[in-house]
Amino acid sequence: MSTLRRPSRALRDPAWLRWPLLALALAFVGLFLLLPLLAVFGYAFEKGLAFYVASLVDEDARAAIRLTLLVTAIALPANTLFGIAAAWLVTRFTFRGRGLLLSLIDLPFAVSPVIAGLIYVLLFGAQGWLAPWLAAHDLKIIFAVPGIVLATLFVTFPFVARELIPLMQAQGSEQEQAALTLGAGGFTMFRRVVLPKIGWGLAYGVILCNARAIGEFGAVSVVSGHIRGLTNTMPLHVEILYNEYQRTAAFAVASLLALLALATLLLKQLVGWRMRRAIPAHDTSA
Amino acid sequence: MSIELSNIHYRYDGVPALDGIDLAIESGELLALLGPSGCGKTTLLRTIAGLEFPDRGSVRFEGRDVTALSARKRHVGFVFQHYALFNHLSVFENVAFGLRVRGWFKRPRRDDLQRRVRELLELVQLGDLAQRYPAQLSGGQRQRVALARALIIEPQILLLDEPFGALDARVRSDLRRWLRGLHDRIHVTSVFVTHDQEEAFELADRIAVMNKGRIEQIADPETLYTRPASPFVCRFLGEVNELPAALHARWTGIDDDGVVAFVRPHDLDLQPLDGGSGARVESVRDLGASVRIEVRDPRLAQPAVAIYERARYERSGLAPGQAVAVAANRQVLFRGEQAVRVELPDSWRARLPYPAIG
């Protein structure tokens, strides 16, 4: 069973060490996590509910929310598909370059999002390598929606794959082989055997991916061009408002992001809990 | 459906796992692949199933070449060592799986499917557990679910990988007899892998003993036991004393230092002597139904082991420290890897009990 077990009594520290440590940890959480979160909501409502609602239904704010939802709606399925495919490849086959693929999946975690944005500017920007070809075909990527989608895709690349790879490795492929000997084709096998096995892990990865896609700032900021109503996502909109001394409006939009974050946390906990309960049943041996 | 394997070669990471396997399995036969771990027996089974593909050689079912056919198309029932049940599906759905994944036109109708799954569950005596999940079953029950799941596609060939490996001893022997009974009823060509010689002997019509990617011998249990083709087979089929020429020359008349006599513990005969500097009983261990006697001979590096039934032991007058003469009721001779057949003179047979070495 993988439920959290209480640590052994023998490992417990004495009270004089335990209580100060606990106090320190709680103080940190309170000061750096809880207080700022409360502050977001405090500032958002400082001019009353009417102003709060007005800030959210403002035309630019609505455009920003729409764009964020659009980008997420593209990045999420794309990276879910990619994540499943990559995890499948890496766990079920051995091939030349498998190690390289594994490290490359982690690349977006390793590089700064700003650099990720810059890469796309250098590739597709006005002075970029592909600029002449793009110009000839009348395609605009940088300072436009496609650039934002690309940057978001890049930074949210690893979430699903990273979640699935260890899970699929641990589960092994015997059930799939069994399905194969029973005459199941590739798609049937995926739908009836693989998907139920990885379901909760997949959900977990998708939730994390979703949170990051909505909240991404750095990479998107570089490629977006901050064109109000056109290429502003929610995080960028918050920044612009704040820079224009519209503090309350900025925090109103920010509170929306914070709510999304809280919802994500809740979902994540729920799925994590379901996953831990499901794993003993996934145990193929015994 | 008969199976013919010819000249199967398979390398795993450059190491030969199967090294020129030729094997013909008759229709309706129950064959055991017996060998130590790492001898290639599971790889061979998976090759028949189409879960591994040989580098060279061919696999034929009833004369039809299936070497390049995938497991999906071979229509072979396979029972995995750890069962590989679908944990998210009930017992019923596990068994129904093979029917549900069929193409739309070949899929049986709902009531037909229900009936067939029920029938199979009755056959494996799991009728009342249909709605349980694999996690709620015992090892033996899971094993039978795996079997029913493999049989639903009505395979002409059934392959079982260490079918009793994960079960405890009592369940194992019950299930073994039950499986033999089942095979006698449904007569599907069956091959199973095991490292347990007792299991192979109890279940199989014929046994293929494997070692290092090769088949050492394939024969019925009796032939295997009485006329093993190599020292490996002889050793693998159970405990055996290896007595060098110096000890057995007087039983056989072969005075050749290269020849070793292989004698099973229950074929060793011990006669008490009044004294002498030769063999002595070193220890006696009670095994319940039988008694294990170790005899130390100054000319042997290892003690010789005899196993007596309890009554025989009580009659024999043997005890630790007793000087004994050692003789063999039956033996197999090898010179190196080569079996040595000797025609013993009639007079030798007549001189029972055999001339002992004191």
Image (tube, rainbow, N blue to C red):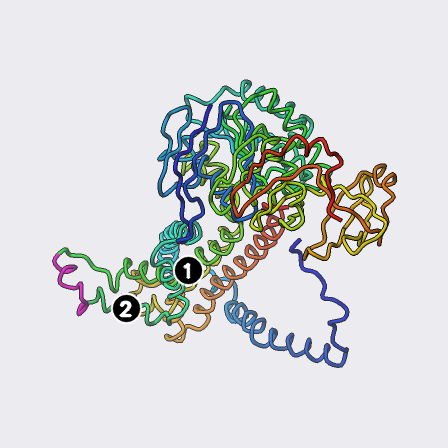
| Relative horizontal placement of residue B235, taking residue A73 as reference (left or right) | right
Range of magenta residues: A126-136
Q: On the image, numbered disc 1 is attached to which residue?
A: A158
Q: Reply above or below: B200 against B151.
A: below
**Tag 2 subunit:** A
- Disc 2 marks a residue whose amino acid type is Ile
Q: On the image, numbered disc 2 is attached to which residue?
A: A119
Q: What is the quadrant of residue A284 in the picture?
A: top right
Residue B256, image x, y percentages:
57, 48
* Mark closer to the chain start, 1 or 2: 2
**Tag 1 subunit:** A
Residue A167, image x, y percentages:
51, 53
Q: Residues within 10 Å of mark 1 (few under 14, many from 20)?
A: many
| Relative horizontal placement of residue A132, taking residue B95 as reference (left or right) | left
Residue A130 located within the stretch drawn in magenta: yes
Q: What is the quadrant of residue B7 in the picture?
A: top left
